[in-house]
Image (cartoon, rainbow, N blue to C red):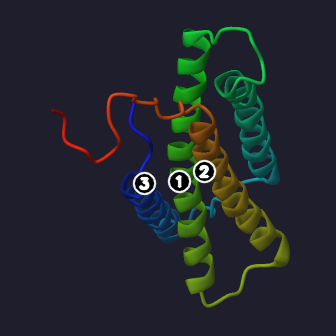
């Protein structure tokens, strides 16, 4: 599995932002209510970020040799998939929060403090989830193998 690069994260962030902005615009133009994510979403995203890091730490300890038990490959693959999914979902949800924030700040009537607090905490926790996913991916990485046959950069004989 390849590491998550910046292109998918930026792409999902932009897709989430555009979709959320257009959703808010359509809902408001039809007389509906503006969607504001509740504070529990931000708390849940932060809790998932902590869980992802805590699940990746035992893998790192086994890879570096601090623990002697063998690595369960299925556990490592599941944690790695969770880390990648967390970073991608965090980017998408961060874009959704940014789209909502952009819509709220572009309105002629300023939103109140509770709405801004919910949206900003949503964005911050989504960024924390992206960071936790990327950190967990790096914790699950194997160290480079030592190659005794030749130095790096030397052609093979």
Q: Are marks 1 and 2 in contact (CB under 8 Å)?
A: yes
The residue at which mark 1 appears reads as 91
Mark 1 neighbour class, 10 Å CA radius: few under 14, some 14 to 19, many 20 or more: many
| Marked residue nearer the N-terminal end (1 or 2) | 1
Label 3 neighbour load within 10 Å: few <14, some 14-19, many 20+: many
Residue appearing at x 48%, y 67% in the figure: 21
Who is closer to the viewer here, 98 or 72?
72
Task: Examine the image and state in which quarter residue 120 appears.
Answer: bottom right
Question: According to the image, label 2 marks what residue?
Answer: 130
Which is more toward the observer, 83 or 90?
83
Residue 100 x/y as whole percent: 58, 67
Q: Residue furthest bottom?
A: 108
Q: Residues within 10 Å of mark 2 (few under 14, many from 20)?
A: many
- Give 91 or 24, whichever is nearer the viewer: 91
Between label 1 and label 2, give the one nearer the viewer.
2
Is label 1 in a helix, a strand or a loop?
helix
Q: CA distance from mark 2 to mark 3?
A: 12 Å
C-alpha distance separating marks 3 and 1: 6 Å
Quadrant containing the C terminus is: top left
Residue underneath mark 3: 12
Point 72% across, 45% down: residue: 45
Assign the N terminus to one quadrant of the image: top left
Tell me whether circle 3 and circle 1 mark residues in contact (CB < 8 Å). yes
Residue 106 shown left or right of residue 46 in the figure: left
**Dot 2: element:** helix
Which secondary structure lies at badge 3? helix
Q: Which one is earlier in the sequence, the residue at label 3 or at label 1? A: 3
> Between tags 2 and 3, which lies in front?
2
From the viewer's perspective, tell me whether residue 112 is left or right of residue 83.
right
Closest to the observer, 129 or 73: 73
Q: Position of residue 138 (x, y in %)?
A: 58, 41
């Amino acid at each position: 599995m390849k590491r998550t690069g910046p292109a998918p994260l930026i792409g999902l962030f932009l897709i989430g932002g555009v979709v959320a902005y257009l959703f808010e615009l359509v809902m408001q133009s039809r007389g509906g209510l503006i969607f504001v994510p509740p504070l529990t979403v931000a708390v849940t995203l932060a809790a998932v970020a902590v869980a992802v890091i805590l699940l990746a730490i035992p893998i790192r300890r086994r890879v570096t040799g601090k623990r002697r038990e063998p690595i369960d490959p299925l556990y490592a693959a599941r944690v790695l998939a969770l880390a990648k999914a967390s970073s991608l979902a965090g980017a998408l949800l961060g874009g959704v929060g940014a789209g909502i924030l952009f819509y709220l700040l572009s309105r002629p009537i300023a939103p109140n403090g509770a709405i801004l607090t919910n949206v900003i905490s949503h964005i911050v926790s989504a960024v924390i989830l992206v960071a936790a996913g990327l950190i967990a991916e790096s914790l699950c990485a194997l160290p480079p193998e030592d190659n005794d046959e030749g130095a790096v950069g030397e052609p093979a004989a």
